Amino acid sequence: NSDLPVLDLRPALLAAKRTSRVYAKTDSHWNEWGARVVAGEIHEYLSAAMAKGGRVAHPAPGVRTGRTRPGGNLAMMLTLENSFFREERVKVLSGMSFRALRAELPPLRLAPTVTVEATRNGSAPFANAVMFHDSFGRRLKPYLSELFARIVYVRDWGFHFAGQVIEKERPAIVLDEIAEHFLYNLEFVNDLPKKNGI
């Protein structure tokens, strides 16, 4: 019953699948090509939502398969990641020049289960953002860092919503990426600092 906007990535991923695999064969995560498609969808959605113009023109990347490496989490469950179920790497040849640089982290003490990263980009089209994510966010970071003047990435293995990061950063945009199979972990607790006892 929330009015928060949800970006359904399935149509874009299914369409991109005609060009190349968007998920790893031996892993539940999207590969580099899948992450590139998802980042493009986020870019396009925000451009429309924030009146930054019409449809975003994305350069058409090439996709190259590379050498194999140990299989991913599905292969690891079978303990066959080094033998039977190895993974062929998918490399995106996008022609993009990445300009984002590491930035200083918000001065906060967070739980040991939380990892925080931050980047800055003076030529980015959007203002500051905070992104909460699970392991799917890892491959998105290089692309999303190109979209925001500053973005703070928060990953919490306990799946808490670190409201104090939003309070400190005051972002224009908050993104929350979570795989559907993790939704049962969520606890919607308001952990923003209390004001006037409320």
Image (cartoon, helix red, strand yellow):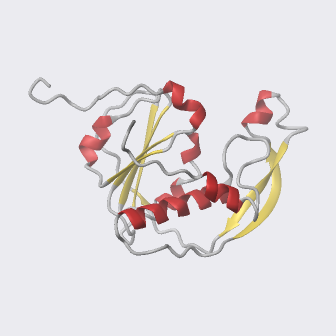
Residue at figure coordinates x 58%, y 52% from the top left: 9
* Horizontal side of residue 74 vs 2, given as left or right: right
Where in the figure is residue 190, as x and y percent of width and height? Answer: 29, 29
Q: Which residue is at a point 72% across and 62% down the rendered structure image? A: 91
Q: Is residue 33 left or right of residue 46?
A: right
Q: Quadrant of residue 100?
A: bottom left
Residue 96 falls in which quadrant of the image? Answer: bottom right
Q: Residue furthest right?
A: 84
User: Is 81 displayed left or right of 134 in the figure?
Assistant: right
Considering depth in this image, is 53 or 123 the residue closer to the camera? 53
User: Which residue occupies the extreme front position in the image?
Assistant: 1
Is residue 141 placed above or below 176 in the rendered structure? below
Quadrant containing the C terminus is top left
Residue 82 occupies which quadrant of the picture?
top right
Quadrant of the image containing the N terminus? top left
Asked if 111 appears above or below 106 in the picture, the reply is above
Q: Position of residue 52 (x, y in %)?
A: 37, 72
The reply, left or right, for residue 36 in relation to residue 63 is left
Location of residue 146 with respect to 67 vertically, above or below: below
Q: Residue at x 69, y 62 (%)?
A: 16
Q: Residue at x 35, y 47 (%)?
A: 105
Q: Total of numbered circles in the picture? A: 0
**Residue 21, image x, y percentages:** 76, 56
Foreground: 18 or 185? 18
Location of residue 174 in the rendering, given as x and y in whole percent from the top left corner: 36, 48
Taking the view exactly as shown, the residue that stands out farthest to the left is 196
